[in-house]
Image (cartoon, rainbow, N blue to C red):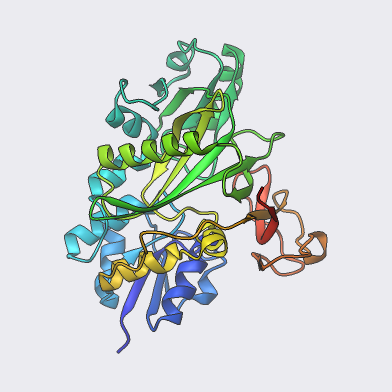
Amino acid sequence: MKKRVLILGAGNAQIDAIEYCKAHGYEVVGCSYTTVDCGIPHLDYFEQVDIKSIEGVMALATKYEVAAIYSIGSDLAMPTVMKASEILGLPHFISSKTAEVCHSKNLMREALGSDFKGNAAFMVCSTLEEALQYDRFPGMMKPVDSQGQRGCFRVDSAEDIKANFAASLDYSIDGKVIIEEFIDGPEISVNAYMQNGEMKIAVVSDRYAFDEYPGGIIKEHRVPSSFADEETKEKTVDLARRIADKLGITDGPAYFQIKLKDSTEPYIIEVTPRLDGCHMWNLIKHYCGADLLDACFRHLLEGESVLDDEYPQSSVEYSLKFMSKESNAKFAKADFDTDGAEYTCYYYADGDRVLKINGFIEKCGYVIRKTGNLV
């Protein structure tokens, strides 16, 4: 009998994991709270189980005798992955406590501490009355435990808080909102990989968001970073390394979303102990040859280290650009420019309706291109 892997969630980000595992000889079991996720047809087995249910996931893992439980691009899944794996004695990268801290925006900031260089000022509130005490405008108001920019709003006044508080709170499972100091500056990311407490690789990339929509909804990533000079990159990687050490991210992938205050000082926005949900592993593979997806699953399933200490810096800039449409719009491949793409991925077939995820503008696929030679 083939070994089996249980993947939590079956959305577009999970298709990368599903296809990888199947290509390497594993059968893949999947679960989701819904039965319409795009990844379901790619699975060998599917059951409708909420990925937040530790008991449900454990029962599924036991039923199918899986070798491991994992997920990509889902903050919601990580606490379940780690807790269920701890209890069942399955391989996992970090403790469930660390996963919970990273999943909760307020716990993450509290764990880092007010004196941690690169941590932003914040307050947590569960009622509008509490939220209206915030006075360090501008700020960013977010659910403490959502993902994918859901319920995120910039607030420049008490009126903005009043107008958006209910919508932000609606996305919080714990019924709490965090209002953070707004960091004005370009947005970058660090995609890193940890093994035995050592950061084996850290790639700094530029993150471009839609200006016309709230919450920093992503439209493009570029690597290497043009926003950060070499000194700023060093400070950014140092911030990521200090956060990993402080929070206990000792093994596996980690994704750090960062803003550069005054274009030079890195401040953490979010950190998550997983591969990101934007297929950055694929962009990085095109850029320098490092395959973080392969590293993740070989490390998890086989206990192997497959990352070199050094990867060549490409002389070419690469971009990953999302195809985007409004929620519920009809999808058509012809609407998007894929000329010159080294890699193209469509989430939908022609005529499909685009699912509502953030309610503003939704990812429909992506292209990876060389975008220019570096000077």
Q: Which residue sits at x=46%, y=31%?
A: 266
Instruction: Give the vertical position of 182 relative to 299 (above or below).
Output: above
- Residues 76 and 299: in front is 299
Q: Which residue sits at x=28%, y=31%?
A: 111
Instruction: Give the vertical position of 357 relative to 369 (above or below).
Output: above
Q: Is residue 258 left or right of residue 29?
A: right
- Residues 34 and 236: in front is 236
- Residues 105 and 320: in front is 320
Instruction: Give the vertical position of 181 relative to 58 (above or below).
Output: above
Q: Is residue 360 left or right of residue 275?
A: right
Q: Position of residue 154 (x, y in %)?
A: 59, 25
Q: Is residue 160 left or right of residue 130?
A: right
Instruction: Give the vertical position of 27 relative to 107 (above or below).
Output: below
Q: Position of residue 307 (x, y in %)?
A: 37, 64
Q: Is residue 44 visible?
A: no
Q: Position of residue 195 (x, y in %)?
A: 28, 57
Instruction: In the displayed orientation, state which residue is furthest to the front.
Output: 375
Query: If the image is split into quadrants, where does the N terminus sit?
Result: bottom left
Q: Which residue sits at x=40%, y=76%?
A: 28
